[in-house]
Image (spheres, helix red, strand yellow):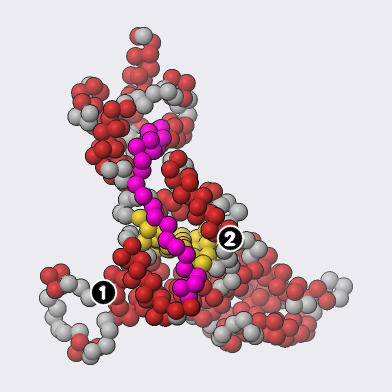
Amino acid sequence: MLLFENKKQKLLNLLKFTGSPFKKFVSTGEIKEDIGLVQSRQEFLHSIINVLDKNDNIILPIIGDVGTGKTHLYWALKHELYYYNIVYISLENVVKKFYYNVYSEFIENMGIEVLRNVSRRLCNKWGALERKFGFFHLAEIDKVKKVACEDWAPEFENKESIMDVINAITAHQLDPYKKIEAERWFLGEVIDIRELSRLNLKRDLRERNNAYTMLKVLVENAMVNSVLFIDDFEKIISMMKPIPIEEQTEEVFDRSWLYGNRESPEKSAANKVLDKIVRLTKINGLRIIITLKSTDFYKEIMSKIEDIDSNLLKLVKEPIILSNFVEDDIYTFYKKNLEYFFGHLNYFDYFRDFSQSYYPLNEEVLEYIFSQTNGNPREIIKFLIKIFNDIVLSNEDLEEILKKYQ
């Protein structure tokens, strides 16, 4: 018995030295998460995967209240659908230069090697393999470009962008002296006029049509299914709505003097972003997931999409509702986090001595947390952060600390 008490004290001492296992309560799309899903979320995840596997072009709304774990769901999808290319964006970060920023996220997620393979296969498809003796014959580039133009003419809207992409791809594959510059163009780097002229290009990928065209080429030819995960999609609606009078700040001048009766710059920007997102549905094989905080936002978004093109409603699937944890989930969630934490510390005694225990907490404390938070994951994590901070920083006995939460 004394030996086990010493093991408990050793665990508490380790916590006081390393800090709390629960240090943040907001999931982000930039910081990788390796904690798996609780049981009730596994069924939810499989329903999403089932929809993605059965459809090539869709918009799938996921509705969940604040703190229910919509962003954490992205990481769960990324782990489960490792054979998919899943890209996360937050609208706050991509409002300006939307296509360029989305394309950049795709390139960062896929890696340059995928882009090189796409470029190689397209050139081969257009006849690049007809080169004799394995040498690069620059005169053959024109023949390859002609085939490419005939192949792509029906698929793309902007002819200038098509030519820029074709010129970049053929230069990358068929002209060894321009390969590095063409690759820089693919990566979205800023290209000056002299370099553009050398590649026979008009603009770099900061130009929206070029960025959209390259995104379409990449997604449709990468030989891997792609999912664009757009978090907090309702921000478009909030941008479109006027600021309530009670929240308005006094302005030095009336903006209507500049803009007349036209819509505000914020509303105009939101409408343009929505138009651009709708245009993404024309990219074959691109599945789009949007997360929303309520069914009211969902109805408003559907109304806006219908105004743009009522035919697009066929692509919008029935929304999937993300609910709070059920009670059993909090026990699993707590144990998984502690196992992940102590595993990274190489403290394997935890798995031997406490695998059947909730120590340093207990079942009564976890039950109390669930009842106080109504199962909201973010609120549960806030509670756990508070309790473990008390354990780590306080000089009180553990029993006295836990009495406050039972």
The picture quadrant where one finds residue 268 is bottom left
Which circle marks residue 86 in the picture?
none
Badge 2 marks a residue whose secondary structure is helix
Mark 1 and mark 2: Cα distance apart in space: 36 Å
**Residue 236 highlighted magenta (yes or no):** no
**Of tags 1 and 2, which is closer to the observer?**
2
Image x and y of residue 321, in percent = 39, 55
On screen, residue 4 above or below 209: above
Answer few, some or many: residues within 10 Å of disc 2's Cα (few below 14, many 20 plus, some between 14 and 19): few
Amino acid carrying label 1: it is Lys
Badge 1 marks a residue whose secondary structure is loop
**Residue 330 highlighted magenta (yes or no):** yes
Name the residue located 55 percent from the left edge and 55 percent from the top edge: 50
Amino acid carrying label 2: it is Lys
Name the residue located 41 percent from the left edge and 69 percent from the top edge: 94
Of the numbered discs 1 and 2, the one sitting upstream in the chain is 2
Image x and y of residue 329, in percent = 39, 38
Residue 225 is left or right of residue 389, and the answer is: right
Q: What range of the chain is rendered magenta?
A: 312-335
Which circle marks residue 54 in the picture?
2
Which circle marks residue 241 in the picture?
1
The picture quadrant where one finds residue 155 is bottom right
Residue 24 seen in render? no
Residue closer to the observer: 314 or 36 = 314
Residue 79 is left or right of residue 9, and the answer is: right
Name the residue located 20 percent from the left edge and 84 percent from the top edge: 255
Residue closer to the observer: 44 or 381 = 44
